[in-house]
Amino acid sequence: MENKGKFLFIGIMFISVILTGIYGYSVLLDVNFLDALYMTAITISTVGYGEIAEMTNEAKIFTIFLIFTGLGVAGYGLTSIFALFFEGQLKDAWRKRRMESKIKDLKDHYIVCGAGEVGNIVIQQFKENKLLFLVIENNPERAHELKAEGILTIEDDATSEDTLKRANLDKAKGLVSSLSNDADNVFTVLTARQLNPSLNIIAKAIEKNAYRKLEKAGANNTISPNEIGGRRIAAMIIRPSVISFLDVMTKADDVLIDLEEVKIGTDSDLKGKSLREAKVPEKSGLIVMAIRHKDNGKINFNPSSKEVLNEGDIMIVLGKPEQVDLLKRIARDESKSSFV
């Protein structure tokens, strides 16, 4: 029952008790309206004033009934009012304490700084891929929305060192800085890099040359939504067939196939084998687009069948999520799938 309906119900019940009392005393004691109202009031309130007429057995029974009924309605009303004003606060406090406890236990997680248009897309992708992450957002309304969705959220300034520490930055796997201006993004990246030198940091660049400052501050990679959007529009005009093909291959709402990376683990049966011997397409149905070797970090596109896979090498493959999961098991890659 909604709060408005609950208060209306309480009001109707209370008025009904009073009207019942007035009618009952008018009939049982043969008194006028004011005297009946007076008897009803002192009965319900149990103040203990004397009766205005001789109480018959019927009037006594009626009074007992009226006292219990009145106390029941009054008790229910007070309880409902108390719940209205305090239950929400108690729930919020319990939810906040529970969320803070979860945040303290986080490790190998991702941190999203800023839940604007770009940050929200990142959040949705993280949710779809069931990744462990939290959001830092200083807008109270947006932070409340995220918390209502069950997303771990810190309502504070992402540029603050204390806030990043509260987000367990030292135990985090990666950070996405998607704040509304370049200055805040630079400061966040700089602070995060000082707190965690090995952290993988991706930052949003707004102005044309902002990526240089972000890279100097410590960002591993920078993304310019405006530039990407402009190139996408131009590509749709210049190469419409190619873009249409890519749209069919990778649907935004229902991922059919996508690029993913698979790392060769320590105990992998693929270690030391060539691509021909590994038979990745035959075993998983995936297409190996490139290999990034651990020793030099270079990416070898369209690798030959003679390319040898070593521990720590990363295969960049094209295929479906379930195919990638299969190859990860074969390669002994314990990292989670990161389809985006």
Image: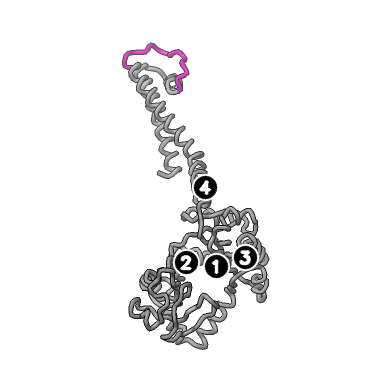
Any magenta on residue 168? no
**Left of 278 or right of it: where is 197?**
right
Give the Cα distance between marks 2 and 3. Answer: 20 Å
Give the crowd class for mark 3: few <14, some 14-19, many >=20 residues within 10 Å: some
Give the Cα distance between marks 4 and 2. Answer: 24 Å
Give the Cα distance between marks 2 and 1. Answer: 11 Å
Q: Amino acid at mark 4?
A: Lys
The image's colouring method is one colour
Mark 3: secondary structure: loop
Instruction: Name which residue lies at 39% across and 22% down.
Output: 67
Q: Amino acid at mark 1?
A: Val
Q: Earlier in the sequence, mark 2 or mark 1?
A: 1
Q: Amino acid at mark 2?
A: Gln
**From this viewpoint, which residue is outermost toward the front?**
272
Q: Earlier in the sequence, mark 3 or mark 1?
A: 1
Q: Which residues are magenta?
A: 45-58
Give the Cα distance between marks 4 and 1. Answer: 26 Å
**Marks 4 and 1 in Cβ contact (< 8 Å):** no
Q: Is residue 54 above or below residue 165?
A: above
Give the Cα distance between marks 3 and 1. Answer: 9 Å
The numbered disc on residue 96 is: 4
Q: Disc 1 designates what residue?
A: 118
**Left of 243 or right of it: where is 225?**
right
Residue 289 x, y percent position in the rendering: 45, 81
